[in-house]
Image (cartoon, helix red, strand yellow):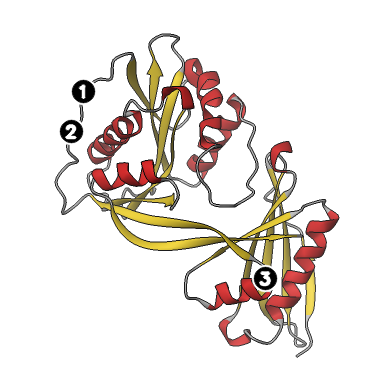
Amino acid sequence: MSLRITALTDPGHDPYRRRLAWLAADDGGHPVGSAFLRLPTDPGQAHLAELTVNVHPAERRRGVGSALVEAVFAAAREDGRRVVLAPGEPGTEGEGFLTAHGFRRALTLRHARLDLVGAAPVASVALSRPGYRLVSWSGTVPDDLAESFAAARPAMDDMPLGTVDYGTVTWDADRVRAVARTVAERGEHLHTVAVVAEADGAIAGFTELVVPADGLGDGLHYGTAVLPEHRGHGLARWMKVASITHTRERHPRLGGLVTDTAEENAPMLAVNAALGYLPTHESHQYQREL
């Protein structure tokens, strides 16, 4: 089979990332596969690219994926990227494909789910933490907390992430508002619980959760983090309990909450287990250096 690989124009650029796209077609002009390359524009991630490849099941093992990947690698090198990341599901053809093209497993994520229908409400924890108070909001962060929330976001940067060379992300108030706007444009609901340190009024930690537009199915934890100087006080569990409780009240028809955590992140795995999250499966991130 002869292949034609066509670079496409992706209109979905925003201030924080670009995306390149390719379409593979057979000699009859029929689409047989596609590839996308996400290119962060943040200076701390200028080395990084994130790959997604899809090939029609009937066309696999015929060189389609390989041709797409070669086009992707060439574009990544031309853009100065040194590292390409790609997701892989355990035991699938996709993992074998990535390995054959020079990728290595760099991160294992453990997925877990909290049943909101059959399970009892999460066990309560102390109603307060000396020196801290809880705040929460839906959608965009309130203006009076926006700068502090942006300053707290780098608490995610030192989370254990296997050997993935993910780099760092630069946050400001405009960027945290942009995240909330993106979720809202999809019709979904973003809920945030944060901890404020009484000593200086700054946010010391946060947890985010996204609920489907219709309030059905499962909600998704986006991230939970505590600044290093505030760790060891049980703040992550305190925030998550509040988030779960609020979600039950706001979305009574929601079936569950799902989360994924790096297998090296023992503290967060312990928090999730203590709150009743049950393991469901694992997924992997693969990495290739160019």
Quadrant position of the N terminus in the picture: bottom right
Name the kind of residue labelled 3 in the image.
Ser
- Identify which residue, 222 or 271, lies in the foreground: 271
Left or right placement of residue 252 versus residue 76 in this view: left
How many neighbours does mark 1 have within 10 angstroms: few (below 14), some (14-19), or many (20 or more)? few
Residue that carries the numbered disc 3 in the rendered image = 34
- Whole-Å distance between the Cαs marked 2 and 1? 8 Å
Residue 203: x %, y % from top left? 45, 20
Residue 46: x %, y % from top left? 74, 44
Residue beneath the point at 73% across and 37% down: 43
How many neighbours does mark 3 have within 10 angstroms: few (below 14), some (14-19), or many (20 or more)? many
Residue that carries the numbered disc 2 in the rendered image = 124
- Whole-Å distance between the Cαs marked 2 and 3? 48 Å
Q: Earlier in the sequence, mark 2 or mark 3?
A: 3
Left or right placement of residue 121 versus residue 196 in this view: left
Q: Are marks 2 and 1 in contact (CB under 8 Å)?
A: yes
